[in-house]
Image (tube, rainbow, N blue to C red):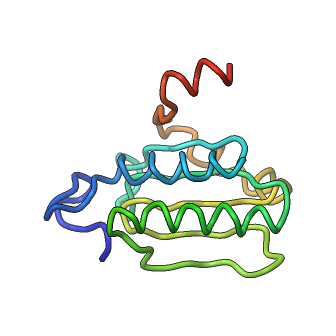
Amino acid sequence: MTVSGVRGHGGDGLPASRDVAIRAARAAADKQASDVVILDVSELIVITDQFVICTAASERQVKTVVEAVESSIREIGTRPVRREGEDGAGWWLLDYVDVVVHVFGEEERAYYDLERLWRDAPRVEWQQASEAATSG
């Protein structure tokens, strides 16, 4: 099952893209991914609504974060339509149609700098108030 129906709004009983993105961000953060960001690209491109971008410190952590995101989103009945990346690549992509999750190694995150590329995209707040208070 993929995120489909009314684009980004959770049609057909499926979760809305924002909810999927927030769930992915929280799963990544739970596995100690750093610099977790959600960008709302829905007004800039037509192929997706949200980018979730995060950094993992090692190849092992990249795999752990990818597995955690997939598991968390699978709990709400959604699976990626595409999964790209390979051992040692430093960048994994999980494509949920309306949400694309990017899990980078540190060097790859700095090199591709998706936040700069999509700087016109607003950031989506995803941390709960208690999480924000303890991190800042």
Can you give x and y, in whole percent of width and height, for residue 32 in the image?
A: 72, 47
Can you give x and y, in whole percent of width and height, for residue 88 in the image?
A: 83, 76
Q: Nearer the viewer, residue 46 or 19?
A: 19
Picture layout, residue 14 above or below residue 44 = below
Residue 67 location, quadrant: bottom right
- For the C terminus, give its image quadrant: top right
Q: Nearer the viewer, residue 16 or 113?
A: 16
**Horizontal placement of 41 versus 59: left or right?**
left
Residue ID at (44%, 51%): 21
Picture layout, residue 27 above or below residue 129 = below
Residue ID at (71%, 69%): 63
Residue 29 location, quadrant: top right
Residue ID at (62%, 66%): 66
Can you give x and y, in whole percent of width and height, for residue 133 in the image?
A: 60, 18
- For the N terminus, give its image quadrant: bottom left
**Horizontal placement of 42 versus 34: left or right?**
left
The image shows a total of numbered marks equal to: 0
